[in-house]
Image (tube, helix red, strand yellow):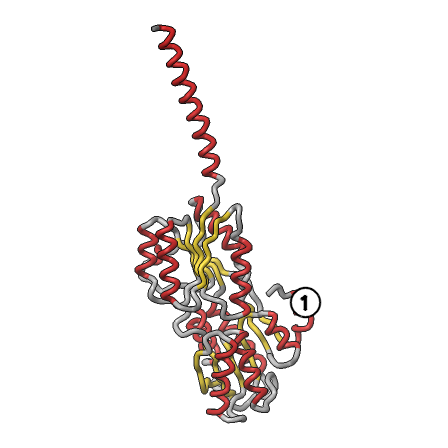
Amino acid sequence: MNKGFKLAAAVLCATVLGACGKGGADGQAAKNEAITVGFSQVGAESEWRTANTRSVKEALAAPEFNLKFSDAQQKQENQIKALRSFIAQGVDVIAFSPVVESGWETVLREAKAANIPVVLTDRGVDVSDDSLFVTLIGSDFVEEGRRAARWLIDDSKDSTGPVRIVELQGTVGSAPAIDRMAGFKEVIGQDPRFSIVRSQSGDFTRAKGKEVMEAFLKAEGRDGIDVLFAHNDDMAIGAIQAIEEAGLKPGEDIRIVSIDGVRGAFEAMKAGKLNATVECNPLLGQQLAQIIRDVHAGRPVPKRVVVEEGVFTREQAATELPNRKY
């Protein structure tokens, strides 16, 4: 009996030690397990968005990350469905670039109840409780609007007469459309020479930018527009087509300033058809990946992470074009 008891004890001890060793290995495996990220993108409406998506996918790649990617096709209802799917799947972190600012309160509360941290990329949300998201990484859209206006004022320093501006807005209700308009108006409002005679959404797309610019030209006539301010480069490039088809010279008969700084804008500036572009850097992937690592590990992160950007003119286009990564 004594011998049997000792044998049983030895077996039990070996089992416990084996379990402890396995537990340690499991603990290490858990530590090295991929971070599952649910990412909902606005869509693929522009060169900027395509570059942004590529940057995110490259940065959130296996084996460190398990990326679940969803394209909302510029529809908020698609994004909300995607976020709820991520919650149901129990992802570690949710990241998304919101189509519009409002309408997120309910789904973000659902994520918080499930203890899933949310990181906003590129665009912000309008919620009553900012604890519903951990941080926002992206550009300062208000400042981008201000930079466009400052460039225009400087470029108009020799002009004494009125400067009539048409504005191609981004998607209605989106953070960049709201903020870029606000920043632009804040600055030009200080100079009585400037007035916005037409303003309409081109939905951040090239085709819609062309369509709306055609309507502006029809309404204001060939001589009724001095400047086009476009909330992104794709709309500006579409508008350039409309201006040329109307028999006018873009960049000369109508000066054009837009936002994003994509290769297409630099090519248009090099050709003399676009006067200036305000940079909005889409290559957020590596910064987003680091933020997700920190959030997943429970490390503190800033509530707002702003990327550094500049303003480029057509005089700089030929030199700068080879350096553009998007």
Q: Quadrant of the C terminus?
A: bottom right
x%, y% of residue 301? 45, 51
Residue 283 position (above or below residue 19) = below
x%, y% of residue 145? 49, 73
x%, y% of residue 304? 45, 58
What residue is rendered at 50% in x and 67% in y? 44
Q: Nearer the viewer, residue 291 or 304?
A: 291
Label 1, secondary structure: give it.
Answer: helix
At label 1, the amino acid type is: Pro
x%, y% of residue 233? 54, 74
What residue is rendered at 65% in x and 73% in y? 317
Q: Where does label 1 land, which residue?
A: 322
Q: Nearer the viewer, residue 306 or 26?
A: 26
Which quarter of the picture shows residue 131?
A: bottom left
Residue 275 position (above or below residue 159) = above
Which quarter of the picture shows residue 102?
A: bottom left
Q: Nearer the viewer, residue 105 or 4?
A: 4
What residue is rendered at 34% in x and 62% in y? 104
